[in-house]
Image: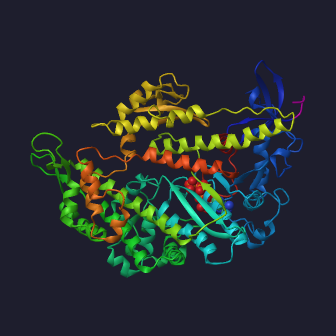
Amino acid sequence: MEDGKPVWAPHPTDGFQLGTIVDIGADSLTIEPLKEKGKTFLASVSQVFPAEDDVNKHVEDNCSLMYLNEATLLNNIRVRYSKDKIYTYVANILIAVNPYYDIPKLYSPDTIQQYRGRSLGTLPPHVYAIADKAYRDMKVLKMSQSIIVSGESGAGKTENTKFILRYLTMSYGTGQDIDERIVEANPLLEAFGNAKTVRNNNSSRFGKFVEIHFNGKNAVVGGFVSHYLLEKSRICTQGQEERNYHVFYRLCAGAPEDIREKFHLSSPNSFRYLNRGCTRYFATRDTDQKILQNRKSSEHLKVGPLKDPLLDDHGDFNRMVVAMKKIGLDDAEKLDLFRVVAGVLHLGNIDFEEAGSTSGGCNLKRQSSQALGHCAELLGLDEEDLRVSLTTRVMLTTAGGAKDTSIKVPLKVEQANNARDALAKAVYSRLFDHVVTRVNQCFPFESSANFIGVLDIAGFEYFEHNSFEQFCINYCNEKLQQFFNERILKEEQELYQREGLGVNEVKYVDNQDCIDLVESKLVGILDILDEENRLPQPSDQHFTETVHSKHKNHFRLSVPRKSKLTVHRNVRDDEGFIIRHFAGAVCYETSKFVEKNNDALHMSLGSLISESKDRFIRELFENSNSSKDVKQKAGKLSFISVGNKFKTQLNILLDKLRSTGSGFIRCVKPNLKMVSHQFEGSQILSQLQCSG
Ligand SMILES: Nc1ncnc2c1ncn2[C@@H]1O[C@H](COP(=O)(O)OP(=O)(O)OP(=O)(O)O)[C@@H](O)[C@H]1O
């Protein structure tokens, strides 16, 4: 840094500000901001960076900045964003800032045409350029390719994924039905797997890897979607400002009268699984008038609809129906899907009260009988069987003279509530699996030469309270970061060395120890959790204590009281742990880890649902709780591990990624208000740091 020349120094909201160095201390610098002459502040030497001569100039590739550092990179993105240039390269990696509005012509068919077959860098940075590079690499190297799209919730991963899919099918499709089906599959997946959260009105609550397959002549022949970790807690409860999955509201708002009657639908107000969250519909002024008054919640009637340029529950219902038709679902299949969604809503309305006898059990509340009837009817169950299965649990005796005799154990109100919610989660998540399977059947291919896969999965997450969901997603991000390091840093450096280029070694932290902490056999956190689940009386506390005792001096693990944040210091040692991730330390609260790690229904519910009179419901539960299985497992604790299933899926995914060429897109959310033209520097900086 030269004397008197402007530098970038930290700023609490903008990330960095321009200033000049007025004094140099042992390890800090005194800075005078350009905007506030006469006022000075101290900054550590490591946080002050040289500025470009012209800070209003911008470049398409950050690597061509005179000084490449955190501050100049942030400034370059800021200047470009102010000119609607949301895409910027860092060598081959694309940074994409969410504009939160439609930039004219940015994704038009003409633009698609322009990028076709053009090398990276010949046209302005664009997601299409990354898609085309993947295609050309696939063609030239005769090797499948992957594009990893990452970023926090609301950063634009799903939108960019869709742009890639549309680009590839439009540019390299055969112009046949299959191209349209690949694009049309999205609204369907989004209806069942996306929801309004405080961070994103259309948040994907599952991860996905979408493959587009090509034949030997490099034309599109089909597609395949793999999905990961649907957020199940949302099916039963949502935060006050959040909603359940879109399909519930779309059905309530948009279903024609005959469907509404058949499935006994009404406003979101009247369903427990909806009315504890936000019950308003997304609508425009016009579409709001199309929704019948008796389908609107009191909240909606009072404050009006939610607004989002891309969402409209009434219109989206019709679009969803059209998408179903286009991908080949007939009317009966469509009604099957709606029926199960409605069945879940009625199931949620079943309430229990203490039985008032000495049994310690519970009964259904009288006013729940209608909900019970509707639910049983829609899910093809016997009303009485459903009542009994929700309020009692069957156990087989394992010893003594009466071995293998089944006994009915009454459930307490809280246990019955849990059983009901577990059934709702199981039914809905099976339904979601079915939607994905069905989507995959609609673009089948017999064989393919290569594929281009696009990974759209949640980025690193840390909130004030973090649970099993964040634990899984951050474990996934550790694995992806390791892959990124391997691909971008390690392989590039090896190349430089091979070619004898004197490039300074870029240091990065190997995170294998963190991955091992989670996934090692027996001593890894996932295996410790499974072990806990198999105990006769598993508990979150015991699990947490075991984690701490097995990894006492692990560099990556510590107890919550060592946190820098007060909220975490209040968490007891047996209530949580801190993991030092590559992107920062996260405190996980382990309450419900045991429950969330188990996908099995209790025995009575398992056999009830898998023996439904309804063919569709039976098919959803095929290969899971078959009655034979259940009987065999009787006496033992039924347990299906969520964590280890995810680990297996993730390892398959990573093997796949390692066997393909790769491209990376880092999506950035410009502000927390979800509005256009607002660049909040400091939080963007932390996203860039999180992405390594
Ligand atoms: N390129 C874009 N142009 C216009 N609007 C965009 C663009 N990218 C994103 N958006 C807007 O931002 C919203 C959030 O984007 P998106 O759903 O893709 O985020 P995400 O990273 O997938 O989030 P999540 O992890 O919650 O699913 C979109 O619904 C859309 O309104």
Q: Quadrant of residue 253?
A: bottom left
Residue sitting at x 69%, y 58% = 99
Q: Taking the image as drawn, is residue 509 in sight?
A: yes
Quadrant containing ligand 1 reads bottom right
Q: Is residue 605 above or below residue 16?
A: below
Instruction: From the top left corner, tell me how far across and down residue 555 is, in percent.
Output: 56, 25
Residue sitting at x 22%, y 61% = 386
Would you say the magenta stretch is mainly helix, strand or loop? Answer: loop
Residue occupying the far bottom of the picture: 258
Q: How many marks?
A: 0
Q: Is residue 200 left or right of residue 521?
A: right
**Coloring scheme of the render?**
rainbow
Instruction: From the top left corner, tell me how far across and down residue 69 is, in percent.
Output: 79, 38
Q: Quadrant of residue 157?
A: bottom right
The magenta-colored residue range is: 1-5
Q: Is residue 348 left or right of residue 8?
A: left
Q: Taking the image as drawn, is residue 572 in sight?
A: no
Q: Quadrant of the C terminus?
A: top right
Q: Is residue 640 above or below residue 84?
A: above
Q: Is residue 628 above or below residue 554?
A: below
Q: Nearer the viewer, residue 25 or 304?
A: 25
Instruction: From the top left corner, tell me how far across and down residue 394 is, in percent.
Output: 19, 51
Q: Nearer the viewer, residue 68 or 214?
A: 214
Q: Is residue 167 above or below residue 653?
A: below
Judge whether residue 3 is colored magenta.
yes
Instruction: From the top left corner, tell me how far across and down residue 441 is, in percent.
Output: 51, 69
